[in-house]
Image (spheres, grey):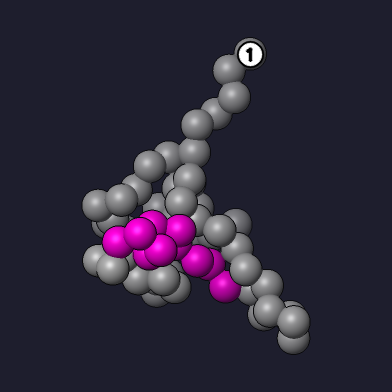
């Protein structure tokens, strides 16, 4: 489970290195320099936060 807003954000991606550690990467950083590529967790406020949409049945 990812702490803070990133745990429910559609822009968050987990990247695993070849040696094993896992890092959270913000996909917004590729299009906007205002967002950190690897944010310090837990993120409590973020202008780019968008919750993951739950599938509707």
Q: From the top left corner, tell me how far across and down residue 25 is, in percent.
A: 50, 66
Q: Quadrant of the C terminus?
A: top right
Residue 24 in magenta stretch: yes
Q: Residue at x 35, y 59 (%)?
A: 31
Q: Residues within 10 Å of mark 1 (few under 14, many from 20)?
A: few
- Tag 1 secondary structure: loop
For this orientation, the residue located farthest to the bottom is 19
Q: In which quarter of the image is residue 51?
A: top left
Q: Which residue is drawn at 41% across and 63% down?
A: 30
Q: Quadrant of the N terminus?
A: bottom right
Q: In which quarter of the image is residue 27?
A: bottom left
Residue 55 sits above or below residue 17 on the image: above
Residue 49 sits above or below residue 1 on the image: above
Range drawn in magenta: 23-32
Q: Can the viewer see residue 43 in this picture?
A: no
Q: Which residue is drawn at 68% across and 79% down?
A: 17
Residue 4 in magenta stretch: no
Q: Report the front residue among 41 and 34.
A: 34
């Amino acid at each position: 489970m990812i702490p803070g807003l990133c745990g429910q954000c559609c822009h968050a991606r987990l990247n695993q290195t070849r040696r094993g550690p896992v890092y959270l990467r913000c996909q917004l950083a590729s299009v906007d320099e205002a967002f950190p590529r690897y944010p310090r967790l837990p993120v409590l406020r973020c202008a780019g936060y968008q919750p993951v949409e739950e599938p509707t049945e």
